[in-house]
Image: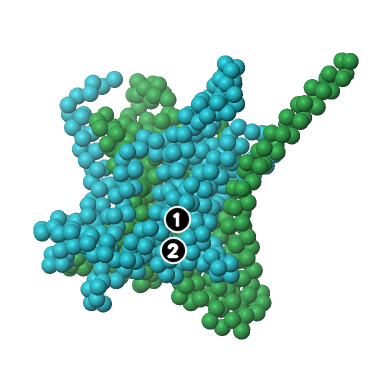
Chain colours: A green, B cyan
Amino acid sequence: MDDGTTQIALQRHTDAKKAERKLGWMLVAPAVVLMLAVTAYPILYAIWLSLNKADLRRPAANEFIWFDNYVTVLSSPIWWTSFGVTLFITVISAALELALGMALAIVMHRTIVSRGLVRTSALVPYAIVTVVAAFSWRFAWTQELGWLAGDNAPLTSFWPSIWIIILAEVWKTVPFMALLLMAGLALVPEDLLKAASMDGASAWKRFWMVTVPLIKPAILVALLFRTLDAFRIFDNIFILTSGSNQTSSVSMVTYSNLIRGLNLGIGSTMSVLIFITTGIIAFLFIKLFGAAAPGSDAGGRR
Amino acid sequence: MQPETTSRKLVWWGINIVVLLYAFIPVFWLVSLSLKDDATLNDGNYVPTSPSGDSYKAIFNNEDFIRALINSIGICLIATLVAIVLGTMAAYAIARLEFPGKKAIVALALLISMFPQIALVTPLFKIETALGLFDTWPGLIIPYITFGLPLAIYTLSAFFREIPWDLEKAAKMDGATPYQAFRQVITPLAMPGVFTTAILVFIACWNDFLFALSLTSTSAARTVPAAMSYFTGATTFEKPTGPIAAAAVVITIPIVIFVLVFQRRIVAGLTSGAVKG
């Protein structure tokens, strides 16, 4: 009799487990199927297209050509210029965003007057459509029209254009960075800072010796997010310079090949190369800095 | 510690004003441009000397702009709604249930949120052309849902973990049916998180430019950011600066109001989703 009831209980337990498993899968299935259908399948298709000559203007000439497209792209100065431009913009804006984002986070965290007002207005750049902000900067720097330009036309030469693109990118994303860092700052125990202060540590020292080591995970995650995001920069460059004076990013060059050149083979090759580069950046972050992907250790950083 | 003296307050006011200027200078510049009339448009002043509503009249008489505005609102609302429904289901499962493959799904969502969208543009262009989805609402809604989902799943599962689910059990013990327990106890607790997530997903869709530009070719599905980049003046010699500025202000105002009203929740949503995971 004892055996019977234990078995029934065990049976019920496994049944409940099974039911939970089934329900879990059913609930996530639509989201997972959709995400895979719209990303994994096209990426595989892009890899296939990148091995083909696929020019929409000359469909008759389409054929399988192995890695010829990769040779074409990787030996093209246009690709390497845009690659360099993208890397430069990515590194400089991520660094500036980290510094300014940290400053803004501290202001939002520490201010003793009108905290709500500061936090609210800091969200404004985040909420504004990138294209809208880019138009604002473009008009501001347009000769005669703009309040910043005067008689100059900075968007018609390379370096001024690059700096304005970085300015637009940084302005828009500092608030997002600051919010991520502020969440980290909130986790620093106030007692620890007080103790350090009593031991005679200056504010500067407290920041570097206490705060920074404690919020390092938040910094690394924010930096990883922003680096990968900056690497796909498109909107700002499209509106500010349309890629003139060699200011194209890799995304811009790929777009031009597709829409203006209608060359799917070359466009797909660039797509695959960007995908691989993004993977390498993420890998380097995780290997070199030990940035933990959020979710990978849920609860570990609470 | 230190007393909150007047001088300390003054310093903080100074710092806060710098933040306000930082946030609003580019925005007010667009507002000012949109209010300038033709004669003063090119004077380079930050403040308009003779404000006029001509640019606004021009865009609201422009059929392409009206159409783009309808497209933007419709496409983003539908994409947000679907992403929230699917995201809520998935986030509930991730926050509450044990099943194999959960970690892989979280990793997949993370991967997609960092995905270079341009890598999808070429293949999606080809696939959507073949399926007849190119330049239609669904052609944009589907990618928007896909990139809204990771955001929704992250933010919602963080919110759901904070809900005291034992309350549901307690309600059932007090005699509530499972439906009543869910409807009257859990739903009110979950709604703020769902609502916040909806705002974040909507902002992300509203902001998109790349897909709107590459997966449309006419005003049938082109959203406002893409349409703005195609604006032309009434004649070829007239620069469309004023109308572009007016259109920019029109699509900015609703979002800024949203953010001002729901500031606290948005801050909570952005930080919980991205850092806690």
Q: Which residue is mark 2?
A: B221
Q: Residue at x 24, y 43 (%)?
A: B20
Q: Residue at x 39, y 24 (%)?
A: A190
Q: Is residue A87 left or right of residue B48?
A: right
Instruction: Quadrant for the N terminus of chain A, please.
Output: top right
The kind of residue on which mark 1 rests is Ile
Query: Residue at point 65% right, 79% down?
Result: A63
Q: Is residue B75 above or below residue A251?
A: above
Mark 2 is surrounded, within 10 Å at the Cα level, by few (under 14), some (14 to 19) or many (20 or more) other residues, namely many
Q: Is residue B162 visible?
A: no
| Mark 1 in CB contact with mark 2 (< 8 angstroms) | yes
Q: Quadrant of residue A188?
A: top left
Q: Position of residue B185 (x, y in %)?
A: 51, 25
**Chain of the residue under label 2:** B
Say if residue A59 shows up in the picture.
yes
Residue identified by numbered label 1: B75
- Residue B151 percent location from the top left of the image: 50, 45
The chain carrying label 1 is B
Amino acid type at circle 2 is Ala
Q: Is residue A267 above or below residue B112?
A: below
